[in-house]
Image (spheres, rainbow, N blue to C red):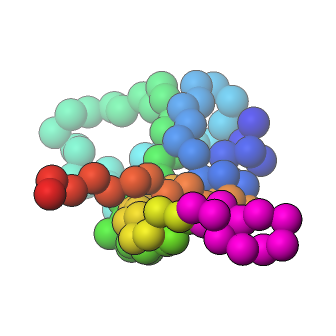
Amino acid sequence: MLDRVFKSGAAARFDSRYFEGFGLPKVLESVFAHIGKINMHTIEILPVPSDERVIWKVSVLDGAGKEMAGIPYIECRLTQRGTEEITYTRVYRDL
């Protein structure tokens, strides 16, 4: 499963008992010192938000390569990026 998360960039949640030695980084211990002992129960891997956008044109071609139909100017925003896959989401705008 973890391999798939890195390949696709998808979000994932894991029970921390599967990760030995996983804890709060030393730099954050002083920030959360007022809480006392912190037990990590869940680890989440989330895609980093992005404003990267791309504009595509989608065309339907016949057997000879002639355009039969098309949708110009489809704007999409990068939703998640992994090592092997990228996902874009359609940006809808009011006309």
Q: Is the N terminus in the top left, top right, bottom left or bottom right quadrant?
A: top right
Q: Is residue 19 left or right of residue 10?
A: right
Quadrant in which the C terminus is drawn: bottom left
Residue 65 located within the stretch drawn in magenta: yes
Q: Residue furthest right?
A: 63
- Left or right of residue 6: residue 35: left
Magenta region: which residues? 59-69
Q: Residue at x 65, y 71 (%)?
A: 67
Q: Report whether residue 16 is seen.
A: no
Q: Quadrant of residue 69?
A: bottom right
Which of these two is toward me, 38 or 70?
Answer: 70
Q: Is residue 62 visible?
A: yes
Give how far across and how far down residue 32 sits, in percent: 23, 45
Indicate the quadrant where residue 78 lies: bottom left
Residue closer to the observer: 60 or 74:
60
Q: Which residue is pictured at 44% across the width and 69% down the height?
A: 72
Dividing the picture into quarters, in which one does residue 66 lie? bottom right
Picture mark count: 0
When the figure is inspected, residue 67 is found, relative to residue 35, above or below; the finding is below
Residue sitting nearer the eye, 95 or 21:
95
Percent x, y for residue 20?
A: 68, 38
Residue at 40% from the left image edge and 54% from the top image edge: 90
> Residue sitting at 78 percent across and 74 percent down?
65
